[in-house]
Image (spheres, helix red, strand yellow):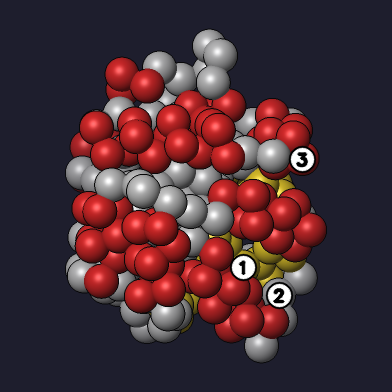
Amino acid sequence: MRVAVISDIHGNLHALEAVLQAVDHEPPDELWCLGDLVGYGARPNECCAVVRERADLCLVGNHDLVALGGNNVDLGEFNPEAAAAARWTRSALSEESRAFLESLEPAAEREGVELFHASPRDPVWEYVLTVEAALAGLQVSSAPVVLVGHSHVPLAISLRDGELAGDHAPAGTDRELAEGRWLLNPGSVGQPRDGDPRAAWLLLDLDERRASFRREEYPVEETQSEIREEGLPDALATRLASGI
């Protein structure tokens, strides 16, 4: 089975549309989303609607949870820009979007794959950005392939015979997954943070045991204009141009 894996859309409809157009050229058997459909960006309802229609599996992320309010996630956990965007998103969410996000969980399993929004140790909050976090995550999981999002940085890290290897997976990275266990992060669709502003996604071939990291151009300036038109913090728009 071939699967397109996406994550961290963050209300960026233009980036999502660009990725899905590329996905449709493959096309895979399924589409999986690792969460954070909303937050930061100005098109949360449209992104929820598209993912609800297209994804065969979808997780909930920390930004989705804080947008739902209640006892899900405390706004105090966010920096000021993220908190401001979360407050705006709470007010902007439609009933349909809210119901969809409320139906989701932060972790899931498929044959040979474990999926987490953040990490196996903490599916909502932990960032896997260090060797220690990657090793810990692989040690508390058991599937041959572990998928995580949340950090907005694409990763391909393997554990073979007790040895950890791998790191950042920039555009064009291809990995054979036949040996060892793997922790993979597809990167972010809507707000990349690895210095590449293009929308990120992962094509995963579970039969051939291969992972291919992809990037797609999208009209960044249109997303920036939408963020500014809604009065969201300008930093959330500015950073999109440089992918940081």
Label 1 residue SS: strand
Residue in the picture at 62% in, 38% down:
93
Q: Could you tell which of marks 2 and 1 lies nearer the N-terminus?
A: 1
Q: Which residue is disc 1 drawn over?
A: 4
Q: Amino acid at mark 1?
A: Ala
Callout 2–callout 1 Cβ contact below 8 Å:
yes
Q: Is residue 136 above or below residue 164?
A: above
* C-alpha distance separating marks 2 and 1: 6 Å
Q: Secondary structure at mark 2?
A: loop
Q: Which residue is mark 2?
A: 28
Which label lies toward us, 3 or 2?
Answer: 3
Circle on res. 96: 3
Report, in whole angstroms, how far the alpha carbon at label 3 lies from the one at label 2.
Answer: 27 Å
The mark found on residue 124 in the picture is none
Let me know if residue 173 appears in the view.
no
Q: CA distance from mark 1 to mark 3?
A: 25 Å
Quadrant of residue 220 within the rendered picture:
bottom left
Furthest-top residue in this view? 71
Which residue is farthest bottom?
Answer: 25
Q: Which of 167/243 is in front?
A: 243
> Does the rendering let one see residue 49?
yes
Residue 125 rendering spot, x and y as whole percentages: 38, 29
Q: Marks 1 and 3: CB-CB under 8 Å?
A: no
Helix, strand or loop at mark 3? helix
Quadrant of the frame with the C terminus: bottom left
Q: Residue at x 25, y 71 (%)?
A: 241
